[in-house]
Image: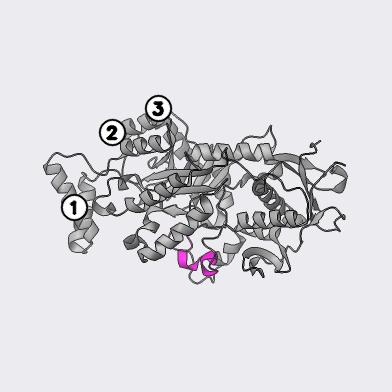
Amino acid sequence: MPDAATWHILALRLPAALRGALEWALVELGLRLGGRFALHRDRASLPANAALVLHYGVGDAADDEIALPFDPGPARAIALPDGATLWASGDAAAPDLVAGAAHLLTFGHEAACFAPAASPGPDAFGRIPPAAHPLARAGLRLVPLIERAAAHLRARIAAAGQPLPPAPDPWGGGRAAVVLTHDVDGERLHDAFVLARAAWLGLARGNRAERDALALGLGGMLRGRADPYWNFAGWAALEAELGGRGAGSFYVWPGATGAAARHPRDCRYDIGAGAYNAALRALVAEGFDVGVHYGINSHSPAGYAEAFARLREALGAAPAGGRAHYWAVRWADMIGGWRDLARAGFAYDASLTPLDLGWRNGARLPLLPALGWGGAEALAKDAPAPFVALPTPVMDGYAVPRQAGRPEAEIAAELDAILAESLVPGGLLVLNWHSRTLQDAGSWQGYMPPLRRILARARDSGIARFLSGAEAAALWVAHARASFAGIGGR
């Protein structure tokens, strides 16, 4: 039986077809509201000493319960009289935030983008073009809608004079988590293929950055200099300075497997041999999180399982998580893809992006998609640790004007908005800077200044805690299990 410090969500007679998604949304909102809470499917399981009860579903609320509007209709952006925008069904007078959160969690807001008549439809990798994304079109790409819904619920509790749960503190000490990750796409400039590509793009196609890379590479080789793209030790030193030993994540391509042939745009290195293997094993030995950069053709149960096994064999350690190359996950079935990753042995995935700065489904904090396929029972103490999805709102190319194709001032303003939302107590900021960008040279010149500004802002906040992806995922699971007191009723 939950103790008197536990608050309660009463979810009554939810429609059978929607109950799983709505209960998932209730738990995700509960984790963002703070404190310890329980979910109840009938009134009989509520303890007599319950001090705070949120009532959601079919039926009237008792006088001492906070009634949440119940209207599981079409969710959309709803502007409130105070100017805030929520994602909900119903209307501004009575927005159903739970249905709105469920719509975002299950990617219902994107469904029309994958319809046969969608225009523009998905690109060659099955992704939604960034300008066509529903949240971008609604002007909400930079808004953490699910966290905003939780804040709205906290305001309702306070306005009702009910005891307010303590604010969530998943990272400890009222801090914000900053996760610096690196996609390892190819760490050699002193390479015949890379130089030939730079010559073609730089000389024949007029790409100035590639022309500079060609000159840098040939000049460095002739002078016997170190390869400027080989930066594993440099990143490791920076991240150790930021957050201590192992505070960072590297995602490496495992190579072609029986279920996943190499795509022409996949990487071209071998993690099982030579300098790559030595460098990656050194990172593992130092405690860094080295995960899988899933190949473009790998998005199947067998492809994920083989990638997991390949990395474990090559590096002597099982990967905790990963991210998709070209963000080419199964966009039309994210939850199914996450379930396949979980079954393959992965603990988390960091592939959630709108292909631009911002949040793909309005979630600033981690998600627990296992609640979608396994129900709230997935948080039971004797259940395996639930799979975690980490949203990644900032990638290097989206912050570089020539790559993003947007003015520097516009990008800076968007980064400021993301940092203002993320560098707050209990916040989360996941960054993706390709490992070859560290020297700020060749094709990647200009990629480091935005990161330096972000890291300076994080330091100046005084609350940043630098973590690896694996650490952030594990802490979020611990927060979820400490916060969720279980399920009552049928």
> Which region shows up in magenta?
123-139
Q: Are marks 2 and 1 in contact (CB under 8 Å)?
A: no
Q: Is residue 130 left or right of residue 381?
A: left
- Mark 3: which secondary structure? helix
Q: Mark 1 is on which residue type?
A: Leu
Residue 449 within the segment the image draws in magenta: no
Where in the figure is residue 393, as x and y percent of width and height? 48, 54
Q: Residue at x 51, y 54 (%)?
A: 330
Where in the figure is residue 402, as x and y percent of width and height? 32, 62
Cα distance between the residues tagged 3 and 2? 15 Å
Residue annotated with mark 1: 214
Give the quadrant of the N terminus: top right
Front residue of 57/452: it is 452
Q: Is residue 147 above or below residue 310?
A: below
Q: Alpha-carbon neighbours of circle 2 within 10 Å: few (<14), some, or many (≥20)?
A: few
Q: Is residue 301 left or right of residue 404?
A: right
Residue 353 appears in the figure: no
Q: Mark 2 is on which residue type?
A: Ala
Q: Is residue 187 left or right of residue 255?
A: left
Q: Is residue 93 above or below residue 425?
A: below
Q: Residue at x 44, y 53 (%)?
A: 394
Where in the figure is residue 337, as x and y percent of width and height? 55, 49
Q: Are marks 3 and 2 in contact (CB under 8 Å)?
A: no
For marks 1 and 3 on the same chain, the one whose residue lies earlier in the sequence: 1
Cα distance between the residues tagged 2 and 1? 22 Å
Residue annotated with mark 2: 275
Q: Residue at x 27, y 53 (%)?
A: 445
Give the quadrant of the C terminus: top right
Query: Outermost residue, left direction?
Result: 222
Residue annotated with mark 3: 285
